Image (cartoon, rainbow, N blue to C red):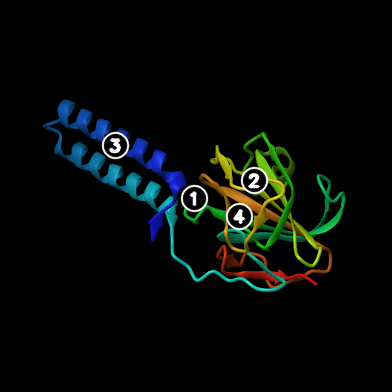
Amino acid sequence: MTIHKEGYTTIALSLLFIFVLNAIIDYRFADVTWLRWAVYIASFALFITVLQFFRNPSRPFVTGGNLIICPADGKVVVIEETQENEYFKDKRLQVSIFMSPVNVHINRNPIAGVVKFFKYHPGKYLAAWNPKSSTENERTTVVVEHANGTPVLFRQIAGALARRIVWYVKEGDVVEQSKEFGFIKFGSRVDIFLPVGTKVNLELNQVVKGGITVLGELA
């Protein structure tokens, strides 16, 4: 397991904060043993939490044919037909994966193909499970066209804690399945919009792994 590049600055700032905090506690409360140890333990817990959030575990990524691979780690919170109004402007099958702060937050391409559309939207920071977060929160929209001509839309959505969405793709890029297309810092969500009638292998509340769990299959 390695640390993702998006975590370097945050980890460095966390270490600086921990160092300064512990130095102040040692200087001002040298005789209060219980307080010093409480701060030591809390500092260690904070550092481990930040470290695990930016972990980048080694995985045997899944690829192949018309398979659709889950774009993120987390729990499936939505599987339903809905109106997609930004790009398709018609009915689509929406699958949403909620990422808690303890999940790996790397986002991966669910299919291989060509990026036909990309747009970043500044916005609010509603809780990621709020239905309005799909249209009102900070988010990105990516549409990749598969080799068989089927376009798939996936959307990074910031949550109540997330304050930065990172993306690595642009229109015209040729992307590989299960390779990174972005990263969201702290709790968040990824939506994927598929043609109505697409075979989906997931169930609500199922825990999935990005780049590994097979979401479904394109017709």
Badge 4 local density, few (<14 within 10 Å), some, or many (20+)?
Answer: many
3D distance between C-alphas at marks 4 and 2: 10 Å
Q: Give yes or no for contact between labels 1 and 3 (Cβ–Cβ under 8 Å).
A: no
The residue wearing badge 2 is: 157
Q: Nearer the viewer, residue 107 or 163?
A: 107
Name the residue type under label 1.
Answer: Pro
Q: Quadrant of residue 65?
A: bottom right
Q: In the rendering, which numbered label is found on residue 92?
A: none
Relative to residue 120, is residue 49 depicted above or below? below
Q: Nearer the viewer, residue 56 or 48?
A: 56
Q: Is residue 49 above or below residue 136?
A: below
**Is the residue marked by circle 2 packed among few (<14), some (14-19), or many (20+) residues within 10 Å?**
many
- Looking at the picture, which amino acid does disc 3 mark? Ile
Q: Is disc 3 surrounded by few (<14), some (14 to 19) or many (20+) residues within 10 Å?
A: some
Residue shown at the point (74%, 42%) measured from the top left: 135
**Residue located beneath label 4 in the image:** 98
| Residue ID for mark 3 | 18
The answer to whether the residues at label 3 and label 2 have Cβ atoms under 8 Å apart is: no
Q: From the viewer's perspective, tell me whether residue 73 is left or right of residue 152.
A: left
Which residue is at 15% across, 34% downward?
32
Question: Which quadrant would the C terminus be assigned to in this image?
Answer: bottom right
According to the image, label 1 marks what residue?
101
| Residue 103 image position (x, y, % from top left) | 50, 56
* N-term-proximal mark, 2 vs 1: 1
Query: With respect to residue 215, does 160 lie above or below?
Result: above
Circle 2 sits in a helix, a strand or a loop, which is it? strand
